[in-house]
Amino acid sequence: MEKQFISLKDACEYSNKSMSTLRRLVNELKDNQPSKLKYEDLKNGSKKILIEVEYLNECYNLNKDNQPNNTNHSAETSKSIDKSNDNAIIQVYENVIKMLNNDLEAKNKQIDALIERQRESNILVDKLSSKIALETKEVKEVRRKWWQRNK
C-alpha cells in the first residue's frame, strides 16, 4: 500500500488544526522523522511540503471521518458524565451563592454599625456646638464695652 501525502493547506482542513500547529509539527518531523514528509517542486522554484495522512491520523487521533476518536466512552457513559458534571457545577454555584450571601450579611452589619456611629457622632457634635454657643453667649454678656466697664 502506497503512503498518501497531502499539502499543509489540505492537512489544515483535514485535521481541523491551524497552519501554525501543522508547521510546528513539520519542523519536528524534519528533525526526527523525515520519512513522514515529502517535498514537491513548484514552477516558481520553491518546494511544497506534503505530510503523510496516516501520520496525521495517529498524531491527532483522527478516524476516517476526520473526527477525534472517542473510543473510551459509550454514549450512555458520556451522558452520565455530563449529568455528574452538571451536578458538580450546580453544587459549586450553590456554594458560591452561599458564600456571597454570607459576605452580603457581613457587609450589611458593617453598614448598620457605621450608620449608628455616624448618628452618635452627630449627637455629640450637636451637644458640643450648643455648649459652645452657650459659652460664647455668656462671654458676650460678661464683656462690656470700654465706656461701660467702670460702671
Image (cartoon, rainbow, N blue to C red):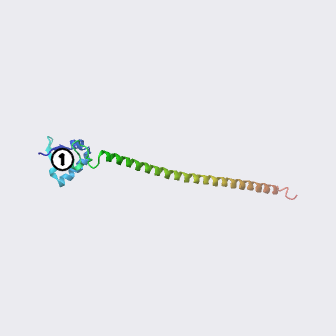
Percent position of residue 43, x then y: 14, 40
Where is residue 1, by image quadrant?
Answer: top left
Q: Report the side of 147 relative to 104 (left or right).
A: right
Q: Position of residue 148 (x, y in %)?
A: 85, 56
The kind of residue on which mark 1 rests is: Glu
**Residue at the outermost left position:** 1
Q: Which residue in the rendered view is the most extreme toward the front?
A: 76
Q: Which of the two residues, 109 or 10, is positioned nearer the viewer here?
A: 109
Q: Is residue 46 visible?
A: no
Where is residue 62 drawn, in percent x and y?
A: 23, 46
Q: Residue at 18%, 43% (x, y): give it.
A: 6
Give the mark count: 1
Residue 66, position as x, y percentages in the image: 23, 43
Considering every residue shown, the one lying at the far bottom of the view is 150
The answer to whether residue 40 is seen in the rendering is yes
Query: Judging from the image, what secondary structure is the residue with disc 1 in?
Result: helix
Which quadrant of the structure image shows residue 64?
top left
Given residues 87 and 28, the one toward you in this image is 87
Looking at the image, which residue is at 69% across and 53% down?
123
Extreme-top residue of the structure: 43
What residue is shown with label 1? 54
Quick one: 80 or 138, which is closer to the camera? 80
Left or right placement of residue 148 versus residue 2 in this view: right
- The residue under the point 38% across, 49% down is 84
Q: Is residue 48 above or below residue 142?
A: above
Quarter containing the C terminus:
bottom right
Is residue 128 left or right of 88 when viewed as pictured? right
* Circle 1 residues within 10 Å: few <14, some 14–19, many ≥20: few
